[in-house]
Structure formats: C-alpha cells, structure tokens
Image: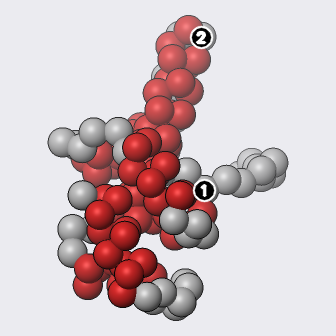
Amino acid sequence: MVAKKILSQKAITNFEAEEHLNNIQSEFVKKEKELPFEINQTKDYLAKVNKGRKSNKDIMQKLKALNLPEQVYIELANILPKNEEVIRTILYKKLEFTDDLVKQIKDAIN
C-alpha cells in the first residue's frame, strides 16, 4: 500500500469538487491514462447529487455575507435546505443562531 501525504485541506462545495475532478479528468485524458477508480466513483456521486441543480456561487456569496463560519455556509450550499427546520438542524451545535438568522439563510437559499 502506498502512503499518501496530505499537503493541504480546504472545504469546498460539491459543485467546486465536480469542477476540480473535471480538470483532473482532462489531465488524465491528455496523458491518455485511465481515471482511478476512486475518482470515477466520486464523479458519479457528484453527478447524482448535483443533478438538476444550477451552480450555487450566488448562494455562496449571500451566505458568506451573513458572516457564517466557512464550514456552515458550505454545508448549507451543498444541502440547499428548503425549510427552516432543516436549517436549524444544520446550525445546531455549530453556532448560536436567532430566528432572524434562520430567516436570512432561508431567503439567501431560495
């Protein structure tokens, strides 16, 4: 088994991950190599999760403007909850929140 070292970490949305994997795929195509199994599986998963959704860059900007922690607004952008109860569930134990913040998040997502 080959040990791999993590050089850096950054939280990204599912859309950003899909874009990144598409770039990796194009590099493999240029080298005429087959994509590794893990990358294929991840691309398939992201295609299913992102299906029917448009890019959420505008939503990300609105959520960032609410001064939410990065991990929270990325999770919200990935899930795109439709009701306040789900938003509260996501926020629970991550930060203190008010009813007004929940409403602002809902407005930003919808």
Which of the two discs, 2 and 1, labels the residue nearer the N terminus?
Answer: 1
Q: Residue at x 59, y 10 (%)?
A: 31
State how far apart marks 2 and 1 are (Cα): 28 Å
Task: Tell me the quadrant of the picture where the C terminus can be found.
Answer: bottom left
* Among the 4 quarters of the image, the one containing residue 15: top left
Q: Residue at x 56, y 69 (%)?
A: 68
As shown in the figure, which amino acid type bears the numbered disc 2?
Lys
Can see residue 44? Answer: no
Kindly identify which residue carries mark 2: 31
Q: How far across and how far down the image is residue 77, in percent?
A: 40, 57
Q: In this view, does 18 lie above or below 90?
A: above
As shown in the figure, which amino acid type bears the numbered disc 1?
Ala
Can see residue 76? Answer: yes
Identify the secondary structure beneath mark 1.
loop
* Among the 4 quarters of the image, the one containing residue 67: bottom right
Kindly identify which residue carries mark 1: 11
Query: Toward the viewer: 25 or 107?
Result: 107
Disc 2 residue crowd, few under 14, some 14–19, many 20+, Cα 10 Å: few
Query: Toward the viewer: 87 or 26?
Result: 87
Coloring scheme of the render?
Answer: secondary structure
Q: Is residue 21 above or below residue 12?
A: above
Query: Toward the viewer: 30 or 13?
Result: 13
Q: Is residue 72 above or below residue 99?
A: above
Q: How far across and how far down the image is residue 52, in percent?
A: 18, 42
